[in-house]
Amino acid sequence: MTEHQMTFRQFLLQDQRRHGISDDLIFLLEDVATACRIISNQIRSGAFSDNLGSTDTTNVQGETQKQLDVIANDEFVRHCSNCSRVAALVSEEVDEVYWLKAAPEAGDYIVYFDPLDGSSNLDVNLSVGSIFSIVETTRALDPGDDASVLRRGSEQICAGYAIYGPSTALIVTTGTGVNGFTHQQGTGEFRLTYRDMTIPPETREFAINASRRLAWEAPVQRYFDECLAGTDGPRGASFNMRWTASMVADVHRILTRGGVFLYPVDSGNRDQGGKLRLMYEANPMALIVEQAGGAATTGSQRIMDVEPTSHHQRVSVILGSRDEVALIESYHGSVSG
Ligand code: P6P
């Protein structure tokens, strides 16, 4: 069997032999893969099962829920609940923490997830994704005390995402690099197709919602304007821009060919602390990006060092090619320094 044909399960068993990941984590990751496989099928058949529309409910973020947001959330809850080691689930779609064990123990897992990120893209048939993060608790959780699920991103043992694009792929790190698996129609297997993903340190491509330029803080405006100044400007180079309105799709492109992604706190979202959420968007993507040789910062702090204060906390996100991220951080430092 060539590595390219290796299934997700076979890769995880190889990972276990090489790095000692536990049976429970393998089972949990297989359950996450099953949830993503089912969500992918729901999306692709959505037009025929009339579930692409919106519900009449809003989630904790104040966003109108798509039917598929609810379906994807329920699939993650159903499948992650199979593992007896999962003590708690934190979902972007639900205010309260799902407590799955009356007496959580040290060594249990907490799973944080955004079940369907970028779901506003569903209406226009563009890429969406699911994001997940797994922490192994070193101290018993206090069930019912939502604050007890708060962990820094540096405590993650695993993170990943599924991208539902022209093909469905599952990208995962368990702390020893980043690997990706494409869903194979017919067999239903996720097969190894992206081995040891790495992000080039330099880039000439950035991803940002440029319509928010007037709201950005000075360091981000400076970075953006210098990129647009082209070869005669201070960067001495021309830049390309991409913005997909799906963090998963933008991060996947950066993992595939480099780049930098920015969703900074600005005057329009500062009251909420930013747009993107720390526990189930920024932290998992930060682990993946760092494991691929990139960097992930708030502009002033490494994302995975942020001490969380709420499980739906938002944060400024700048991540991707490490030299570009370092330059943007230096602009922040020159303002605050
Ligand atoms: P904007 C999707 O709603 C999301 O949370 C991320 O996936 C994405 O990067 C961002 O928001 C898109 O934001 O400003 O383009 O709507």
Image (cartoon, rainbow, N blue to C red):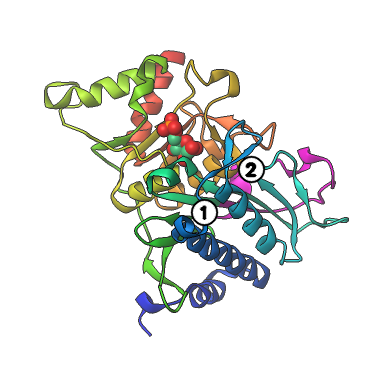
Amino acid under label 1?
A: Asp
CB of mark 1 within 8 Å of CB of mark 2? no
Residue 337 visible:
no
Say what secondary structure mark 1 lies in.
Answer: loop
Residue lying furthest left in this view?
A: 232
Q: Residue at x 71, y 40 (%)?
A: 150
Say what secondary structure mark 2 lies in.
Answer: loop
Q: Residue at x 38, y 50 (%)?
A: 252
Residue lying furthest right in this view?
A: 102
Q: Residue 265 placed where, x, y %?
A: 49, 23
Q: Which residue is at the front of the view, 124 or 117?
A: 124
Q: Mark 2 sits on what residue?
A: 93
Amino acid under label 2?
A: Glu
Q: Residue at x 63, y 32 (%)?
A: 313
Of discs 1 and 2, which sits in the foreground? 1
Magenta residue span: 132-159
Is 268 on the left-hand or right-hand side of 201?
Answer: right
Cα separation, mark 1 vs mark 2, equals 21 Å
Q: Residue 71 placed where, x, y %?
A: 61, 54
Tell me which numbered mark, 1 or 2, is placed earlier along the sequence. 1
Q: Is residue 318 above or below residue 99?
A: above
Q: Mark 1 sits on what residue?
A: 50
Is 1 on the left-hand or right-hand side of 10?
Answer: left
Quadrant for the C terminus, please: top left
Q: Residue 276 placed where, x, y %?
A: 52, 34
Residue lying furthest bottom in this view?
A: 1
Q: Which mark is residue 109?
A: none
Decide whether residue 76 is among the magenta residues.
no
